[in-house]
Amino acid sequence: MTNNQKNPRFLAVTTLERVVQGAYSNVQVDHVIKESELSDKDVRLYTRIVYGVLQHQLTLDYYINQLVARPSELPTWVRELLATALYQMTYLDKVPNRAIFDESIKIAKQRGHDGIRRLVTGVLHHVQRTGVPPIKATQDSVTYLSITASVPEWIIKRLVAEVGITKTKRILAVINQPARQSIRVNSKVSSMEQVTTELEKRGFQVAPSRVADHALVVSNQAAVKTDLFSSGAYTIQDESAMLPVQALAVRTDDNVLDTCAAPGGKTTQIAESLTTGRVLALDLHAKKLQKIKQNANRLGVDNQVEVATADARQLSSLLGDKTFQRILVDAPCSGLGLLRRKPEIRYAKHPADVTKLAQVQQQILASASQFLQPGGILIYSTCTIFKQENQEIIAQFLEQHPNFYEERVPTTFNLLPDRDQAALSIYPDDFGSDGFFVARLRRKTHE
């Protein structure tokens, strides 16, 4: 009997099915890595296939639509099976075609009838003989860039308008590369040197981050499976995502508000800087608060963390006259800075979504700012790259709140020293980390 829990290609197809049904790719990938029986080598192949197919979805769809007579009638799992095979044949030079053919046909036989097996076999042999279909579009056109980079046209048009065609092409050139795995070392229980040594003993390649403090870049996705992770020596977090809390400049005795906290990566980062201080972590969904508690417990900072269910747009009933020295507004956003890590986001978002999110962001920022003490610092951050959710939010807030002013965001490694704005705008091509926006606001001492 076939053990599908050891088959990276089978698991890739089932993961992609779930993503099509609305699941988050990173959550599904983490679950499979933890629960399956994949070897480290197969974890890398599985991860590469899942993210590769999602990253190149529009390109692969173009190929499938040319290669199959009635593509709209394909069952989801068959389309994803073809996509995984075409992705490997087109983008993974070191994977032999024989392995791709054998495993893809086995999956077709196991999950479908003989007609599906013949379809899959025919498509793969055709591509082996003649290659993938050529893309029929002018190379400088938005359509061509959309198909080749697998990014919806509206995103490309907006990027060109905001950062220019040259920067846009640089962004498109990197967003389909595998996401780099980085970890945040828990300074309460370990050190950069200790974690580096222990991970290297376990076969990882480790390098210090050049983006964020207490951060290491590691060689593969299996960092979540180690005993070091389980014992709280580190947590998984992108380098860019560590910058908002570092800019918050938390002191050991501060009372801190984290308004949109789940799943708790930044909450626990704040807590690691506290001794007598506390961080109050809020989220709209009570179920998500459990994840924050679990992370805080694993990292040994649960005594510094309180959680509460709240709509960050309406905080008065929960907080009353309470105030905080530091506030983090890591606002819900379109997430378009995470295209490497959550590649399916690009296909799910539309311009109307960005407009709605910008309204919510403005409401949350205005609401949270009322609870900041005079002289206190508020960080507004997003994991998106559009000005409508970033610079425009800050400009509107400052216009409506003259008792606040913006400060230049400090960074340990002097990131983007020539930038012409106080805020920090990181794009995916800048450092190999996620796209992120960080603005630092201070409430005036005398109002």
Image (cartoon, helix red, strand yellow):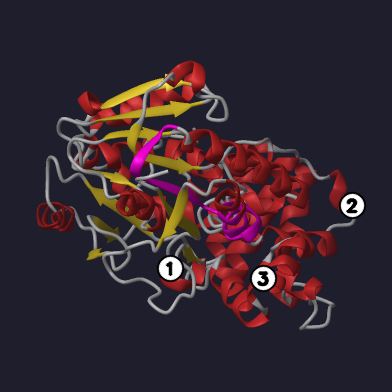
Q: Nearer the viewer, residue 325 or 308?
A: 325
Residue type, label 2: Arg
Indicate yes or no whether the magenta region holds residue 232. Answer: no
- Rate crowding at label 2 as few (under 14), some (14 to 19) or many (20 or more) other CA atoms within 10 Å: few
Residue 4 visible from this viewpoint? yes
Q: Residue placed at 84% from the left, 64% from the top?
A: 66
Q: In this view, does 265 lie above or below 163?
A: above
Which residue lies under the disc numbered 1?
Answer: 432
Query: Does residue 298 appear left or right of residue 127 in this picture?
Result: left
For the point 45% across and 57% down, the residue is 406
Judge from the rendering whether residue 425 lies leftward or rightward of residue 399; answer left or right. left
How far from the left and from the top, in percent, is residue 53?
A: 61, 56
Distance between the Cα atoms at labels 2 and 1?
39 Å
Q: Is residue 192 left or right of residue 176?
A: left
Q: Distance between the residues labelled 1 and 3?
A: 20 Å
Question: Which region shows up in magenta?
Answer: 371-395
- The reply to whether dot 2 and dot 1 touch (C-beta < 8 Å) is no
Image position, residue 195 (x, y; %):
15, 52
Which residue, as the protein is rendered here, is positioned at the far top?
Answer: 317
| Residue found at the very far front of the displayed protein | 446
